[in-house]
Amino acid sequence: MTDLDKPTNFIQQIISADLDAGRVNNVITRFPPEPNGYLHIGHAKSICLNFGLAAQYNGKCNLRFDDTNPEKEDQAFVDAITADVKWLGFDWEGDACYASNYFDQLYTWAQYLIGENKAYVCELNAEEMREYRGTLTETGTNSPYRERSAEESLSLLEKMRDGKVDEGAMTLRAKIDMASANINLRDPVLYRIKKMAHQRTGDKWNIYPSYDFAHGQEDAIEGVSHSICTLEFAANRPLYDWFTANLPLPSVPKQYEFGRLNLNYTVMSKRKLKLLVDDNHVAGWDDPRMPTISGLRRRGVSAQAIRNFCDSLAVAKTDGIVDVAQFEHFIRDDLNVNAHRAMCVLKPLLLRLSNLEEGSCELFSAANHPNREELGSRHLNFSNKLFIDRADFSEDTTLSRKKFKRLVIGDYVRLRGAYIVRADEVIKDSTGNIVEVVGSIVPNTVGADAPEGIRPRGVIHWVDSATAVECTINLYDRLFKEAAPDEGNKNFLEHINPASLIRITGCKAESSLSDAAVGHHYQFEREGYFTRDSIEKDALVFNCTIGLRDNWKA
RNA sequence: UGGGGCGUCGCCAAGCGGUUAAGGCAACGGGUUUUGAUCCCGUCAUCGGAGGUUCGAUCCCUCCCGCCCCAGCCA
């Protein structure tokens, strides 16, 4: 399917219509995270959408931090978010934008609204304000401070700004309609007092603008043409438009809402992710089990896979839950094409080849990719003592060839990229554990078909014992056992999968893996995709990104 | 409950009054294969319900049912 045939989503349809009608000449979008946590896969959808649209229409997309609440925000989050967006492969013109860059302008506009008799300083406390607001079915009641003079509000606002009023004692509110069916229009708060330093403006302000009073105006300042947000903000749109209609803004942006991404077997709210981190259920925001961008990166998911997945997602107004299998498909799809192959034995079992001399050594060449010759090859050492995986050997000679395509005593198997071997006998310790399998190679079978009469049951991977490097492997499973861990009033913490991380030490990797670089993706043949851990750099630790598909029924 | 939004295959979805109702994921069957991987082939829906408008409706109207969002000085 070409781009032209690809169905366009409703936002593309709106943009194209705006362009055609001349309502918009320059497409400008923005990705507006609040720096109060790390970005997750849901944000990636929004990032790909906003930056993608800008690219498609030759416009631009701003990275803009919505830093209007110093209580929850932190410079560390700004840094992490910036790094994640870049890693995903997106860039923006000039510096990132910040809501805090516009605090002076926002304050001036607040004064303007007061002067227009469209805003007032209210002295109702939080509880009173809630009572005056009414309910879903009952209209609200006007604040007793609603009709105070503009002069008084102006001077009170100044006092709020200067720190002369206690937190919670006053707010600046828009004067709209306490009887509106849309609760967002019942005199919403524009400014609240927070006597708190801001990570960027320091202690300059004692009051901070609310989301509603800031967001649309930020868009207007930046000339954003299409302000795309998620569904839950739809009820805020009339308020967004109210500011646009009542303030002397440099441009008139429009808000559009689309359905955010939800995935099963995980949680996707920053509040819940933060709880997992703060309560040490995971090792941090970048724990490989987290759906965060940094967690996925550390897990070994490529930026390309994330982008492909996001591009496969519908931009619509339905809020569904995407099956993680769909995400996993794109992870494997990318890794299958790009990951170099290597061999690593997770649960080593010694295989001694009796018809090779002790200390013998051969060197084989193995392709780094089965169908991409341009990816080159590497050398594989082969001696008379190898490691194979314990799961690839069985003493049970009654196992059918179809059911067990691995090594069985008395039968043959192909060692990937090397000889066909036969298992002859097992050596056990005093407790009956198999400590060694003794076998023999079939001569002249390297890179050659099996000779007449010999039918290997299958192909297994192996590592030369003399040159193997020991490593540790982290195997991951989904973080939650339940498909919808936070559905209804479930306590999602109760559904954490206790086996979401299995750490295996004493694994044996082929020697070429000894200097594996962080950020490189490997397929350990017959096992899965792996990448070197970015935190435990000093040791040889690999994280399993995802296993290979296995369609066979055990 | 007032307001806003949404209901097409197990999941995500295209469809914009006339289509054999796309596609992807999953699943299932088969072929290739020195990874039980990849790859290849094939199978898999009458559109939440009931009325109505129309020659003709998944698409328009009405009513009903279901789900989501809004009563933070969060975003």
Image: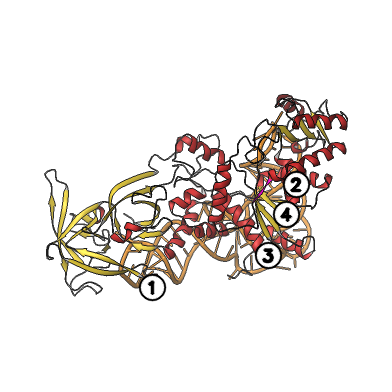
Amino acid type at mark 2: Gln
Amino acid type at mark 4: Val
Whether residue A533 is in magenta: the answer is no
To which chain does the residue with label 4 belong?
A
Say if labels 3 and 1 share a chain: yes
Q: How far apart are marks 2 and 3 (CA)?
A: 23 Å
Q: Residue at x 75, y 54 (%)?
A: A223
Say if labels 2 and 3 share a chain: yes
x and y, in percent, of residue A5 in the image: 63, 69
Asked whether the viewer can see residue A68, the reply is yes
To which chain does the residue with label 3 belong?
A
Q: How far apart are marks 1 and 2 (CA)?
A: 54 Å
Q: Is mark 3 on a helix, strand or loop?
A: loop
To which chain does the residue with label 2 belong?
A
Residue tagged by mark 4? A224
Say if labels 1 and 2 share a chain: yes
